[in-house]
Image (tube, rainbow, N blue to C red):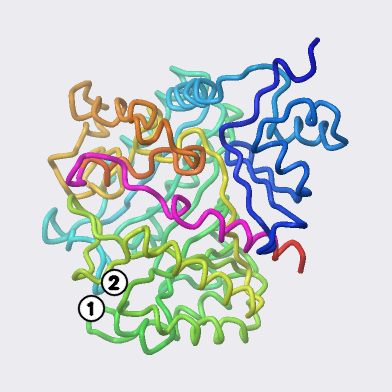
Amino acid sequence: MIEGVHMKISSYNEYLKLDEEGYGKYLIYNSLTNGLGEIKKDLYEALVNEDFSYLTNCEELEHLIQGRFLYLNPVNELEIMEKSFTTTRYQKSTLHLTILPTFNCNFRCSYCYENLTEKTGNHSFTDQVQQDILSYIKSAMEATDLKHITVNWTGGEPLLEFKKVTRLMDQMNTMAAAKHIEIAHYMVSNGYLLTKSRAVILRDLGLKSIQITIDGNKVNHDKRRVLANQQGTFDQIIKNIRDSCDFVHINIRSNVDLNNVASMEDYMDYLGQQDFREKVNIYFSATTDYVAGGCSSSNSCFANQEFSGVILSLYEKALEKGLNISYYPQYVPVVCAAIADNSIVVQPDGWIQKCWNTVGNSNYAIGHISNGIYSNERTEKWLNYSPYKIEKCRSCSVLPLCGGGCAQQAFESIDKQPVCCEYKYNLGEMLKFNYHRLEV
C-alpha cells in the first residue's frame, strides 16, 4: 500500500508540552483508551501535522497502534462509542439495584437531602416491600440471561436498619447462589453506626466497600455533619473507620464547597497521621446543588469549571500526605446509571426512581416495586437521554471521559444541556499530575 494512505490519527488524542520550550518531552494521552505516554518532539510534530510518511516508519508505530493513538485503517470512533453506549445501556447480564431501606437519618447535615422524612413520611421499608424486592430479583433471574447483580445500600442511613438490611442481603445471596449468579453489595453510610462487629457481618455477607463522608477537619465537619441534637460526629466516625477498615474496604468521601475548602489541608494532615491511612482511599467531590432533589448548599457550591482547579490542588496535597487517592480518568460507555435500562432505585415505600437525586420526588417515580416499571414518558425520558444526540458532546474531545455527565443536571439546567465535567477544564493539568505521580 502507499505509505500511510489509510492511516487515521485518533480524534481523542491530547498533547502536552512537558517543558516550556518544547524541545524535549511531550505527553500524549487518548481519552478513549486512557493511554498515557511520553513522546519526543519529532513524533509529536508528525502526529499534529498528520505526517503519515514519518509515522509509517517510526519506531513507536506498534505502541501508537496498541494505544489506539493511531489506526492503520479508517475508523469512526464516535460511531464505535455510540454503539457501545447503546449496547451497554440495554444490557441484561447485570442488574443494578440501589435500595433505600429507610428515609430516616440520625444526622442533620447542613447541606444534605431535602428532609425526606418530612416529604415522604418517617418510615423504613416494610416486610412487604422487602418481599417485593426479592420477587423483582427472582423475576429478573428468570426472564433474562442474568449473570451479575450489584446492590448499593443507601438512604437515609442504611445502618439504622442493620437487621433488615443484613437479612435481605442474606436472602439475596441465597437466591443468587442457587442460580449461579454473582452478587456484590456496596453501601453509602455516614459511618456513625459502623462498629467492628457489624463490619465483620457485612464482610461475610459480601459487602465489597462502604463509602463514608468526612467533610474536612474536626471543627468544620462537626459544624456540617451533626446528630439530631446538633452534637458533632467526627471523633466517632474516625474511631469506627479505624475499627472496621481491616474487615471491609472504606472509601472516604469529602464534600467540598466554599464553607470548608480552607480546612482541607489540616484535615489531610490529620488523616496522614492515622494508623489506618494506607488501608482506606479518599476522594473529593463538589457539594452539588440540585433543583429536583438531593442537596442544597446555600449558594456555596463550586461550579464544575471552578472546581476543576480546586480538586487538583486537593489531590496534590493528599499525595504529599501519603494518602491513597485515585484521580485518573476512565472511559465508561454509560457513566450515568439512571439512563441504563437495567438499573433502578427503590425507595423504602416501594416507589421506583431512576436517579438517586430524585428520591422522594413523586413527580419522577417510574413505578412501584410491587408491580414493576411503568412504560410511559417518565421512563422514556431517561432512556432517551444520550450525549450522542447533543452536538456539543459529539464534538467534544473529552466525551469518552464525561459521557454526557449527569442526566438529572441536564434536565434541570437552564438550557437543558449537559453540564460539562471538570476534565473539560483541567485535563492537561490532571494529566501532568498523574505523569509526575508515575515519575515519583
Q: Which residues are magenta?
A: 412-435
* CA gap, disc 1 and disc 2: 6 Å
Looking at the picture, tell me which residue is in the foreground, 70 or 80.
70
Residue lying at 53% horizontally and 38% vertically, measured from the top left: 332
Residue lying at 24% horizontally and 60% vertically, measured from the top left: 289
Q: Are marks 1 and 2 in contact (CB under 8 Å)?
A: yes
Let me know if residue 425 is in the magenta part.
Answer: yes
Mark 2 residue type: Asn
The residue wearing badge 1 is 228
Looking at the picture, tell me which residue is in the foreground, 229 or 18.
18
Residue lying at 56% horizontally and 55% vertically, measured from the top left: 428
How many residues crowd around disc 2 within 10 Å: few (fewer than 14), some, or many (20 or more)? some
**Relative image position of residue 419 (x, y in whole percent):** 32, 47
The residue wearing badge 2 is 106
- Is 128 situated above or below 144? below
* The N terminus, quarter of image: top right
How many residues crowd around disc 1 within 10 Å: few (fewer than 14), some, or many (20 or more)? few
Let me know if residue 312 is in the magenta part.
Answer: no
